[in-house]
Image (spheres, rainbow, N blue to C red):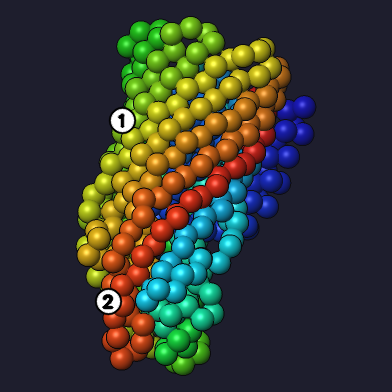
Amino acid sequence: MKRASIVFIFSLFVCLLTSVTTVQAGGFSLYEWSNKSVGMGTVGYAIALDPSVIATNPALMTDLEGSQAMAGAVFIAPRTDITINGETESLKSNTFMVPHAYFTHQLNDVAWFGIGMFTRFGLGIEYNDDFMAGWEAQKVKLTTTSINPSVAFQLTDELSVGGGVELVLGDFEHEFIRGAGFKIDAEGYAFSGNLGAKYQFTDELSAGLSARLPLSFHGNGNVTGGANGDIDVYADLPASITLGLGFQPTEDWTFEFDVVHTRWDSLKTLDYEGTINSKSKFYYKNTWRLQAGAEYAALDWLDLRAGVVWDQTPIRQEHASVLLPSNDRLMFSTGLGFHGEQWFVDTSFMYIMVRDRYGVNVETSPAGAVANADFTGGTTYVGGVNAGFTF
């Protein structure tokens, strides 16, 4: 059983690594790293839900006994209506897959090791071919894959710490149709890291503190279409810090509340150097995300989950564009967990409502003609499944 579990997870890990895609998000940070977490409002910073603690708070590995392996995916389907000069159309319908895979191992009574693969940044926006502002952006995709080996140490009965090194592999596409008629396609990488701590105040109450470091992305690729040649892409992506409080009053009930702060002001420009030379300025504000989740052990083999999230957008009204029109979001989630002695399966569903954004200035021609655009009816459906083993 042990060898078969390792082979299964490793094979699925490799398959998922080749299939990471993108999704529209608030800003473009993603938090869908585990279906158990999604079902509970993406919590998991103060209580060890499963091996996805590598992505949330590596210090929580000290609560995972033996070895654990898990893999799965979350599927995300966004939609938004855009109205320009009285004409309304919707974003192209797409469903994006965001996979994840993790392995944790207890080395001894003090030290743990783990490795995870997940998606921390992603963006996918595609407009119809006749989109009025298509010369500015017909299609934009940012794909990233984080590979995050981590370690954790149990310093005292109450205090655990952990950290890891993160390799971020990225692919960026920016396609213009009207007017410009060219496409930028670049691949690159960046290094970052994460740190975490967990303190167990009582048997019922715990707190977790987790930080992810900023990263500087450099990609190189080519331009095709109206202009052909090489190009380099540069961007600085933000750090974040999360404080979580966990409460387990009985064996059947689990509650957690988290506050996430993201330092979006580090993303100042998106620089193109080469065949195209340009510097797109961002005026992002730092943001807060509040999330709460609960789980009830209804049966020996069945857990019921629910959660709620408020996610603040970093995009200021005066600087919103067709590249990133998103606004503040409110999310409601639920999920089911099935488990046996050495296996578990988690499912999740989340409904996301995006606040309407009115009066966004968009350029409708290369000559600089400007119109007001309204982005309304923004909703996203999220659902997924993962499976894991303990051995």
**Label 1 – label 2 distance at C-alpha:** 35 Å
Seen at 77% across and 34% down, the residue is 4
Q: Label 2 sits on what residue type?
A: Lys
Q: Label 1 sits on what residue type?
A: Leu
Would you call the spot at circle 1 few (<14 residues within 10 Å), some (14-19), or many (20 or more)? many
* Along the line of sight, the residue nearer the viewer: 251 or 343: 251
**Residue 192: x %, y % from top left:** 37, 50
Image quarter (top left, top right, bottom left or bottom right) of the N terminus:
top right
Residue 46 visible somewhere in the drawing: no
Q: Which mark is residue 324?
A: none
Would you call the spot at circle 2 few (<14 residues within 10 Å), some (14-19), or many (20 or more)? some
Q: Secondary structure at mark 2?
A: strand
**Residue 23: x %, y % from top left:** 50, 57
Seen at 34% across and 89% down, the residue is 366
Q: Which mark is residue 243?
A: 1
Above or below: residue 237 compared with residue 353: below
Figure quadrant of residue 339: top right
* Along the line of sight, the residue nearer the viewer: 26 or 266: 26
Seen at 40% across and 23% down, the residue is 256
Pointer 2: what residue? Answer: 279
Q: Contact, CB < 8 Å: mark 1 with mark 2? A: no
Q: Looking at the image, is mark 1 or mark 2 earlier in the sequence?
A: 1
